[in-house]
Amino acid sequence: MNKVLVIAAHADDEALGCAGTIAKHIDNGDIVELIVMTDGVSARPEHITNEITVRNEMLKASSKTLGISKIHQFNFPDNQMDSIPLLSVVQAIESVIGYYQPNVIYTHCAQDLNIDHQLTHRAVMTACRPQPNCPVKQILCFEVKSGTDWQPSSQAQFTPNWFIDISEYWQIKSQTLVDYNKEMMPWPHARSIDAVKALAQSRGSQVGVELAEAFYLERCICL
């Protein structure tokens, strides 16, 4: 049995990036917990207080669809994680790793346009620095539509080297996106259900399966 920890900057990143993989882990008998780093909405010009409540309700619905065991919410300021000392972010992640002792972590890639995604990745890699007795044996970085694919071409790009077949889990992933209906956009927006499925089809075609989620393997310790 694996103890999996998914670390996402915003509620819905986990659904966009690796919901099919989460569903597969849980179907295989693994335990999955989720960290959400920010409130996800406070940076929006039209932000009103009840939006955080609505976002949290969608997070709970999506997590129930997947079967996630526990959600940890830190409520760092949305799109302003660069205003928080990195040490504070790292310590928050370390607090969960310390008690939960996950052996597998999924998080953002370093190449995303979104600053919260970038800093979440950096904080995870710092919290999981390879010291003796570190429980984390595998770190995989996911891509997020409208975050990873909007990175300027002049910058380093996400280049996956790990693919997970989610052909049997697409219906669960698509339901998690429906659970986040207020965050999803109509086609042809990058963050539409059609666009997310098109990406899964494209990644699947790269490895000869119907649908896949793609990752960058940051670390793997094979025993």
Image (tube, grey):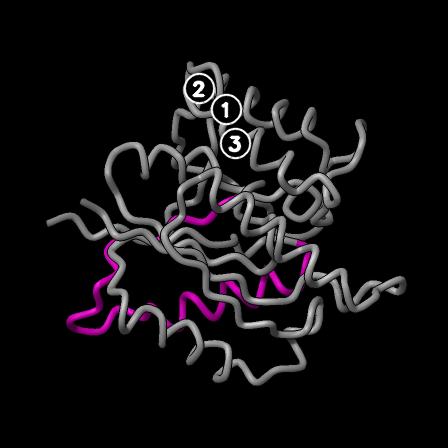
Q: Would you say the residues marked 3 and 2 are in contact, meaning their CB atoms lie under 8 Å apart? A: no
Q: Residue at x 42, y 14 (%)?
A: 208
Q: Residue 142: horizontal and vertical position, in percent? A: 49, 45
- Please tell me whether residue 84 is drawn above or below residue 155 in the rendered image: below
Q: State the separation of the CA atoms marked 3 and 2.
A: 10 Å
Dot 3 amino acid type: Lys
Dot 2 amino acid type: Ser
- Please tell me whether residue 85 is drawn above or below residue 216 in the rendered image: below
Q: Would you say the residues marked 3 and 1 are in contact, meaning their CB atoms lie under 8 Å apart? A: yes
- Circle 3 is placed at which residue position? 173
Give residue 189's mark: none
Give residue 170's mark: 1
Q: Residue 26: horizontal and vertical position, in percent? A: 32, 38
Give residue 167's mark: 2
Magenta region: which residues? Answer: 113-142
* Label 2 neighbour load within 10 Å: few <14, some 14-19, many 20+: some
Q: Residue at x 40, y 35 (%)?
A: 23
Is residue 97 visible to the viewer in this orientation of the structure?
yes
* Label 3 neighbour load within 10 Å: few <14, some 14-19, many 20+: many
Q: Would you say the residues marked 2 and 1 are in contact, meaning their CB atoms lie under 8 Å apart? A: yes
Q: Is residue 121 left or right of residue 44?
A: left
